[in-house]
Image (spheres, helix red, strand yellow):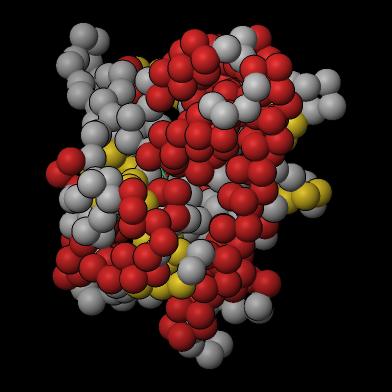
Amino acid sequence: MNINGQPARTIWPRVDGNVEIIDQTALPHRLETRLLTTLAEAAEAIFVMRVRGAPLIGATAAYGMALAMRADASDAGLFAAAATLIATRPTAVNLRWAVERMQRVLQPVPVAERAARAWAEAALTCEEDVSLNAAIGQHGVAILQGLARPGQPLRVMTHCNAGWLATVDWGTALAPVYAAQAAGIPLFVWASETRPRNQGASLTAWELGQQGIGHAVIVDNAAGLLMRRGEVDVVIVGADRVAANGDVANKIGTYLKALAAFDNGIPFYVAVPSPTIDWRCPEGAQIPIEERDAAEVTHVLGALDDAVGGVLPCATQTVRVVPAGATAVNPAFDVTPARLVTGIITERGIAAPDALAGLFPDLLTARP
Ligand code: MRU
């Protein structure tokens, strides 16, 4: 997708053998890129969320393995790199998927050839991510076409950031939105801010603005009111892990949106590429939920509004929003039961949650 009208990706290999990323901790206030030259830097970028979103975490982990092979391509090096990366974030299963893929590919390769093979496999992982998400867009646009009303913009609600910034390109939940824009379907997106890290307010709003799609940021708690008022036509979110039974782990607050959508008869779709489906996990209760630092709840980062009139780059400041010393807890994801999900949009088509396996008979051997 575009930044300032120019096509861009979130991660890309450089000719010098390093990897470059958009540092998402600086957005939307500054557009910065960052070099990843070592396994440790790749792991840090995932852990502190310079890169985030399940597919992009997987893509970065693949390049993290490649950077590790450059330093130590032994079996011990391969194992240690996998362990380091897996430990960074627990919920997004694309991380484990990408690391295991790299291990599977590299294990049989002679040590002297592993670094080159790893670089090629990481690049392939990224290209595949782009194709999977583009296909999600093409399947998802049919849903939006079906819901569109003549002369009125289709009102899509999303949560967190499952746009192109969460992937290598296109996004998952927003891929159908971009496909609809290309098809000339008028759209409006409700972007819920997604406390505590505000990925909706900072990232989704930024990328929708870059693509010229009409949108408004809402506080998370406004979603139910908008649905009751009939101001939402469809909800589309991404996921960090879908269990084999169709239960969906996604950013904290997703479950409440699903409940409100269900109560108001609004279709609730989850868009995922197949690496986000964990066939080894029978149901959502077994998905590990990441607990993050309480400081993400107690403090918020923002721009000094008068700095440069909202134009990048602008000065930022972190402020405390709770009484000094207040305790906070910060579960980063929740699980939406399959019964609240209208359908799961994948690269192979759309399925009811309990029929997801029918789309992927070739992947089911990974089941327990
Ligand atoms: O904590 P984050 O920002 O990595 O969480 C991201 C989300 O929850 C996204 O909705 C999910 O990964 C789907 S991204 C295509």
Q: Nearer the viewer, residue 225 or 346?
A: 346
Q: How many marks?
A: 0
* Residue lying farthest to the right in this orientation: 15
Using the rendered view, name the quadrant where residue 39 is placed: top right
Q: Nearer the viewer, residue 41 or 258?
A: 41
- x and y percent of residue 264 in the render? 21, 73
Q: Nearer the viewer, residue 316 or 100?
A: 100
Splitting the image into four quadrants, where does ligand 1 fall?
top left
Q: Residue at x 61, y 62 (%)?
A: 134
Please indicate, yes or no, whether residue 207 appears anywhere in the rendered image.
Answer: no
- x and y percent of residue 261 in the render? 25, 67
Q: Nearer the viewer, residue 207 or 227?
A: 207
- x and y percent of residue 164 in the render? 59, 49
Using the rendered view, name the quadrant where residue 338 is placed: bottom left
- x and y percent of residue 226 in the render? 31, 65
Q: Residue at x 71, y 17 (%)?
A: 112
Against 310, residue 70 (above or below) is above
Q: Residue at x 69, y 53 (%)?
A: 1
In this rendering, would 138 be left or right of 355? right
Please indicate, yes or no, whether residue 116 appears anywhere in the rendered image.
Answer: yes
Against 176, residue 52 (above or below) is above
* Residue lying farthest to the bottom in this orientation: 150
In this rendering, would 353 be left or right of 40? left
Q: Residue at x 57, y 72 (%)?
A: 138
In this rendering, would 231 be left or right of 322? right
